[in-house]
Amino acid sequence: MPKLKPDVKRFDDPSKTLDGFSYRRGELYCESVSLSEIARELGTPVYVYSQNGIINRTRRLQKSLEPLEDRAGIRFAVKASSNIHILSLLTKLGCGADIVSGGELFRASLAQIPPDKIVFSGVGKTEEEISRAIVAGIELFNVESLSEVELLNVVAQKHNTNVDIALRFNPNISAQTHRHISTGLKNSKFGLTSDEFWAAVTMSEKLPRIKLIGISCHIGSQITDLRPFRRAWEQLLILAKKVKHITTLDIGGGLGIDYQCPIESAALEDYGKAIVTFFKSEPYKILVEPGRSLVGPTGVLVSKLLHLKKRTNRNIAVLDAGMNDLLRPALYGATHGIFPLRSRAPGAKSIVCDVVGPICESADLFLKSQPLPIWGSDSIYALGCAGAYGMSMASQYNSRGRPPEVLVDRDQYRVIRRRETNLDLVNHEL
């Protein structure tokens, strides 16, 4: 077998990047439930989330925002994790929702999120989606184009009602993150340029069914430096003081997390403190749209080793989870830590491998040159920080059913989405 040098840091301690996961007597646990037990009962791959990890992270952000009292509100970014059971949990914690589609509005309603805590963002809202949101009585539309302002007025007229809107400003600020998740640059499809913004202000003042009450800004995702946020907030304040009747500032989300040690990220408390410090003397209601930072570190994707292929210049470990289950590595080149479910397995040998999935695509690669302990046919691992943009981006590519989702609460767990069957793959075709 070739002796290869790893080029990815070894992941030994899940507690450094995950919330709710730890080793106990050589076994990886989510809270007080062994992941090996879940794998035995439900098979692999399977998503597992820590309920109390989600609660802990949400309360940390809420506590850091307390100095703003009722002027601050969390609107969870549903696209990060859209399971209705997780949304319901966040609802009970007092969060609202940031949605980007009619389907997410439907999920939010099933999770009993109050309509007056739902913000509708997104660049391509359809007339039908707008109509449903108006009927539901949502809090706010984040508007991203001049034609959307006109469409909102037309639909509101049909319903004989007025709609509250915020204009999403594009500040042309780099989020210093991956280009696919940087949304605040001038060439981005998101938001309004300065000229478009002022044209939208003028248009809003003339349209009878439009009530402009807010300005919004979201510059990107997985941001680990607070300085780009502050630069965007400065521009929001300047605009808010020039536009009449602004009561609400939606500052978006985008706070990053540690996918692998030793990346240094701003903590939830740092983010909350920065918001409070910046806006405490301002009169506006502040909406915050976290997603990844609340749920990302609270979930893992559990996957079994299928095959170990030995080549002259590399070893390839094939897992039963693929890019259809966890797309981020293929889409963003993202690195998710990998943790063996048994840290002290008898006879385990650490072998440097490329960790891949079974999908018929070369992009189906999770980790390159990663030291991986292998102890036989029952070698099972957890891909870390998979609680955000994992299951919500999963697909049925290669006609593979999507995995189940499990929510753990202390020493109990429940299936919050069952594994898809072959019949599920073709139901809409029959």
Image: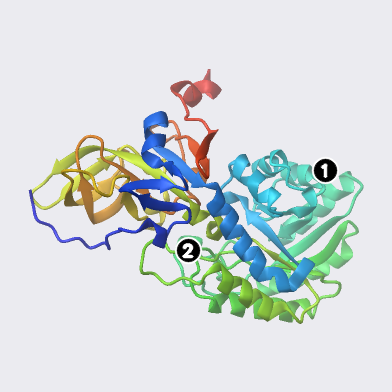
Q: Is residue 363 visible?
A: no
Q: Foreground: 270 or 33?
A: 33
**Residue found at the far front of this picture:** 25
Q: Amino acid at mark 2?
A: Ile
Which mark is drawn over residue 135?
Answer: 1
What secondary structure is found at the residue carrying circle 1? helix
Q: For the residue labelled by badge 2, is the local secondary structure a helix, a strand or a loop?
A: loop
Which residue is found at the position 85% from the left and 59% from the top?
A: 210
Q: Residue placed at 77% from the left, 58% from the top?
A: 149
Cβ–Cβ under 8 Å for marks 2 and 1: no
Residue 78 screen position, x and y as percent? 61, 50
Q: Earlier in the sequence, mark 2 or mark 1?
A: 1
The numbered dot on residue 61 is none
**Front disc: 2 or 1:** 2
The image quadrant of residue 147 is bottom right
Question: What amino acid is found at the position of numbered circle 1 in the picture?
Answer: Val
**x, y percent for residue 248:** 78, 68
What residue is at 87 percent from the left and 67 percent from the top?
A: 205
Q: Which residue is mark 2?
A: 257
